[in-house]
Amino acid sequence: MAAPDAKTPNKKPTIDDVAALSGVARVTVSRVLNGGANVRPEVREKVRGAVESLGYRVNVQARALAGGASRLFTLVHPAADDSEPNSYWESALELGALRACTRNGFHLMTRRVARADWTNRGWVRELIEHHRCDGIILTPPFADDVALAEFIRASGCVVVAIAPGSGARQTTLSVGIDDERAGYEIAAHLADLGHSAFAFIGGLEGHFAAEKRWVGVVRALADKGLGGDAIQFARGDFSFKSGVDLTPDLLAGRKKATALICANDDMAVGALFAAHRMGIAVPQHLSITGFDDTPVSALIWPPLTTIHQPIRKLGERAVDLLVEGMSSKTPRRKPGFELLPHELVIRHSTAVAPQRGMA
């Protein structure tokens, strides 16, 4: 049988089109889309392939009337066995998402995926088939995985990415800030204070948002007439411990840094702790900056200069995008990236660069 022409003007692909293309019965397609049992893996994959090829989307309202919709969204976080979670980032996203879910009449579940499972799809199938999840919010590094987002959509589930990479920004509904611009602003602020020797503690390798912050820092220093030898780089993991552990070596080099930029506040607080332990006065001899504007950044001494990232708003907006993606009453949004504003927050952890003899 010839494949149905899903691209005929004004014709949306139907469940019968999916059945015809995959060569199975309509009831089998329905069973796959609704997470039913007793379907062979190869048949399930064939149906999902047809769904993706045709661009078929489950009629969520019809499924709800049939008792199939759970009105459940899931917020997905990475879990690394060798480091603690980025607690405020996760909790603030969850709070914003929960508020939006409550407002829209949905439930929210969070799922932390162990590093060993980052590249497989078993946890996605569990969310959709077992928990009957209607929408999934991906955070980095999952937000950068274009194939993962496509797999979720092909499974009949709406997906939104938070702080994704450039590829995902073009293909997936997503929301975030301009991380490169934010990195530029914080480095330019320090350069304007007269600093010429910098260090940067980055995040996990492959974390797009943190990498863009580094790109912005380097670009700002270049614009200020400072070359690549003006900054040292160390790879952190967003944890307090990595800030503590990496700071001593960064400050012991031949060209000691007078400005230390950290890719998040947790590492900046760790760097501040290390500086205090080493007897280095902040900000008199060393300026330290963070990123995110978490509550702790304003409570420690000296309080951190940082970038305010509207984390709760990111979680809230991600849920709103999921709701819009499910609704038949609003025009289907094209994949794309929605930019939320950030702000440079200047506090007491940064000051005019010390004279070289005093550093």
Image: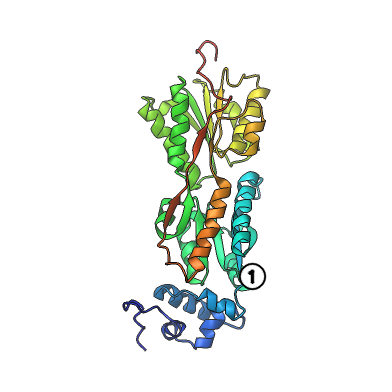
Q: Is residue 83 visible?
A: no
Could you say which quadrant of the image residue 55 lies in?
Answer: bottom left
Q: How is the image coloured?
A: rainbow
Please state if 283 lies on the left or on the right of 336 as rendered.
right
Quadrant of the drawing holding the N terminus: bottom left
Between residues 52 and 333, which one lies in front from this camera angle?
Answer: 333
Q: Which residue is depicted at the point 48% across and 31% down?
A: 186
Q: Residue at x 44, y 43 (%)?
A: 178
Q: Nearer the viewer, residue 249 or 243?
A: 243
Q: Secondary structure at mark 1?
A: loop
Which residue has dot 1 on it?
A: 131
Q: Residue at x 46, y 36 (%)?
A: 183
The furthest residue to the left: 9
178 relative to 281, above or below: below
Q: Position of residue 332 (x, y in %)?
A: 43, 67
In this rendering, would 2 be left or right of 329? left
Q: Quadrant of the C terminus?
A: top right
The count of marks equals 1
Q: Residues within 10 Å of mark 1 (few under 14, many from 20)?
A: some
Residue 265 seen in the current view: yes
200 left or right of 8 in image:
right
Which quadrant of the view contains residue 65? bottom right
The x and y percentages for residue 324 are 49, 64
| Image quarter of residue 111 | bottom right
Tell me: residue 278, above or below residue 320.
Answer: above
Q: What amino acid type is highlighted by mark number 1?
A: His
Q: Residue 237 location in percent, x, y?
A: 58, 42
Please provide percent x and percent y for residue 215: 42, 38
In front: 192, or 52? Answer: 192
On screen, 110 above or below 177?
A: below
